[in-house]
């Protein structure tokens, strides 16, 4: 179809808006154009997180010379004619907005030749100004070059904060598209380095290895290819033995379009019911196919959301297919509590301290206390000496202090203790690393690799010793000694996953935030039974903390019921 400007009524029916939020959104639009053009090979090059350069080349159908100037006009598309077409979209693009939007905020260039034309065309436009078009020799297909994105919009220039964050997003995009389009060869080069390559052989598992590393890819379970029905789901899901702390490992394509959809994530997560521990999430790359007229893709400017005509049907089929696949894999793996759940502190029996005895014997009985109510207060400052009384629900410690009863959240308290220990040791330069007997190789996805490279130094400062190992892997040589009981690979993966969850680039107190995250995972969990000695040790460690009343994330570690409050509750005083 030739490129045409959409009639007013079609244009106004489109969920218009800013398509160019950030460099990664430019990459997404350009990849989608290449795929719509029937490309068998797509190459993406970025420099400085896409801010200096984004270049996407394809060997698709190209743009006929006569149409080239139109391609950068607003609402100019070859993919849609009438408003009805909007209800059954078969292409990734349809708004005719992307190129015009990108061309207006960058130094923009297209080099293209249509399959049946002999000479190609070059179009150059700067910041949406006057365009220059000239005939030029070119290979069949299209190269779009976007330089100095946002150069004319100072407010946008500041965003994103770090090139690496954006590099990582771009890598995530390219790798996910490679998974969804195994017949298309993808290559990604960032800052002069090839970071990803998928051959386009059509073998999904090969594409999966390119993204996740050979080992992970081998473990992922394929959904059956043979399927028929209103909703077809293909792709891979993780076995119950592989899981992570968030939903970032769930990727969905609907009719070839990468979408974010919480209900799809929920369907997959539900399929793992009773196979995974609470708070752990599977990984999956799923391609969902439905009839184009049963899904509305015209919901959001970036086309990253869809609306199904029958969301319930999609949900239940997805959930059933995944569940059946998992159960077809033999008996579900029994979840053995991981090392993270185990006690990490050293148990050193201690005798009751004489200070406590003294403090305990002088319980204040002042009558001009506060109003008669249970005081769930968090007075600032240190906590007094506490005596362990016992554990409730294997989650809370009951303790007695000179001024009443304390209920201590064992997980939050241990987080605080670990956090202060690691920060103090770091300050004093006594932070010890525990060298692993054998260095571990940890494979990451290209986007995780970028995040990791950014934080290697900080991790070093916390006692991790990590070095790059090949293109997508790291060698882990040591972990902080405080975490010596923690599965090292898990410790590192948790940190990486947490980077991913973080939308904002970490700046300033990076080390502290990282330490807090690691401590959160390393701390004893709710539900873990502790001996009296362990309980008392945890309380004693907590007493020694600078900020014992909150965990490093700011949640309270304890609730205090004063003696007065207790007496009033029992009607012993007025
Ligand atoms: P849309 O994809 O919504 O149609 P775009 O602004 O992204 O809008 O692109 C405008 C038009 O330019 C497309 O409809 C298509 O005809 C043409 N085009 C853009 N990129 C390519 C490409 N890589 N190969 C062939 N044609 C392209
Ligand atoms: Mg497009």
Image (spheres, helix red, strand yellow):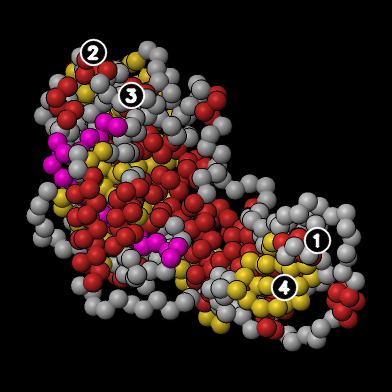
Left-right relation of 345 to 366:
left
The reply to whether residue 187 is visible in this rendering is no
Question: Dot 2: what SS?
Answer: helix
Q: Quadrant of residue 569?
A: bottom right
Q: Mark 4 points at which residue?
A: 399
Question: Dot 1: what SS?
Answer: loop
Task: Assess whether residue 289 is covered by the magenta stretch.
Answer: yes
Q: Position of residue 203 (x, y in %)?
A: 20, 60
The residue under the point 69% across, 63% down is: 558
Q: Mark 1 points at which residue?
A: 573
The residue under the point 29% across, 62% down is: 271
Q: In which quarter of the image is the N terminus?
A: top left
The reply to whether residue 264 is visible in this rendering is yes
- Mark 2 and mark 3 lie on one chain; the one further toward the N terminus is 2
- Mark 2 and mark 1 lie on one chain; the one further toward the N terminus is 2
- Mark 3 and mark 4 lie on one chain; the one further toward the N terminus is 3
Between marks 1 and 3 in the image, the one whose residue lies nearer the viewer: 1
Stretch of the chain drawn in magenta:
278-299
- Relative to 267, residue 421 above or below: below
Between marks 4 and 2 in the image, the one whose residue lies nearer the viewer: 4
Q: Could you give the CA–CA distance between mark 4 and mark 2, rounded to whole angstroms?
A: 72 Å
- Mark 1 and mark 4 lie on one chain; the one further toward the N terminus is 4
Give whichever of 499, 419 is nearer the camera: 419
Q: Name the residue under label 2.
A: 8
């Amino acid at each position: 179809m030739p490129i045409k400007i959409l009639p007013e009524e079609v244009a106004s029916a489109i969920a218009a808006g800013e398509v160019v939020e950030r460099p990664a959104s430019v990459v997404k639009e350009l990849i989608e154009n290449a795929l719509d053009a029937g490309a068998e090979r797509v190459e993406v090059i970025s420099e400085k997180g896409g801010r200096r350069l984004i270049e996407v080349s394809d060997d698709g159908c190209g743009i006929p010379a006569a149409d080239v100037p139109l391609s950068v006009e607003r609402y100019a598309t070859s993919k849609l004619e009438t408003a009805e077409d909007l209800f059954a979209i078969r292409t990734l693009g349809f708004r005719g907005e992307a190129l015009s939007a990108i061309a207006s905020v960058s130094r923009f260039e297209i080099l293209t030749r249509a399959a049946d034309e002999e000479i190609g065309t070059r179009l150059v436009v700067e910041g949406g100004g006057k365009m220059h078009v000239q005939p030029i020799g070119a290979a069949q297909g299209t190269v779009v070059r976007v330089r100095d994105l946002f150069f004319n919009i100072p407010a946008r220039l500041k965003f994103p904060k770090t090139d690496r964050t954006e590099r990582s997003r771009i890598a995530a995009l390219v790798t996910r598209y490679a998974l969804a389009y195994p017949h298309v060869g993808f290559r990604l080069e960032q800052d002069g380095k090839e970071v990803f390559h998928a051959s386009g052989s059509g073998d999904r598992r090969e594409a999966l290895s390119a993204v996740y590393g050979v080992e992970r890819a081998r473990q992922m379970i394929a959904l059956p290819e043979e399927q028929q029905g209103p909703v077809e789901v293909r792709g891979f899901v993780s076995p119950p033995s592989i899981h992570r702390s968030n939903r970032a490992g769930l990727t969905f394509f609907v009719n070839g379009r990468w979408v974010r959809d919480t209900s799809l994530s929920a369907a997959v997560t539900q399929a793992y019911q009773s196979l995974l521990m609470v708070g752990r999430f599977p990984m999956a790359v799923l391609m969902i196919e439905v009839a184009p007229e049963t899904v509305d893709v015209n919901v959001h400017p970036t086309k990253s959301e869809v609306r199904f005509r029958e969301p319930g049907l999609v949900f239940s089929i997805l959930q059933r297919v995944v569940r059946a696949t998992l159960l077809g894999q033999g008996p579900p793996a029994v979840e053995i509590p991981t090392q993270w759940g185990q006690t990490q502190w050293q148990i050193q029996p201690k005798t009751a301290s004489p200070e406590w005895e003294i403090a305990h014997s002088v319980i204040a009985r002042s009558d001009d206390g506060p109003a008669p109510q249970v005081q769930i207060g968090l007075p600032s400052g240190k906590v007094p000496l506490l005596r362990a009384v016992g554990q409730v629900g294997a989650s809370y410690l009951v303790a007695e202090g000179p001024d009443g009863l304390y209920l201590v959240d064992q997980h939050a308290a241990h987080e605080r203790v670990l956090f202060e220990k690691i920060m103090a040791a770091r300050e004093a330069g006594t932070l010890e690393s525990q060298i692993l007997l054998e260095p571990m190789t940890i494979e990451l996805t290209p986007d995780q690799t970028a995040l990791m490279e950014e934080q290697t130094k900080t991790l070093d400062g916390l006692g991790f010793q990590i070095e790059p190992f090949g293109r997508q892997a790291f060698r882990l040589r040591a972990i902080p000694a405080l975490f010596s009981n923690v599965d090292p690979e898990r410790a590192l993966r948790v940190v990486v996953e947490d980077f991913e969850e973080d939308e904002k680039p970490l700046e300033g107190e990076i080390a502290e935030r990282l330490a807090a995250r690691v401590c959160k995972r390393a701390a004893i969990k709710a539900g873990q039974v502790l001996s009296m000695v362990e309980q008392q040790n945890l309380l004693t460690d907590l007493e020694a903390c600078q900020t014992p009343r909150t965990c490093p994330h700011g949640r309270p570690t304890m609730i205090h019921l004063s003696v007065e409050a207790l007496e009033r509750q029992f009607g012993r005083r007025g």
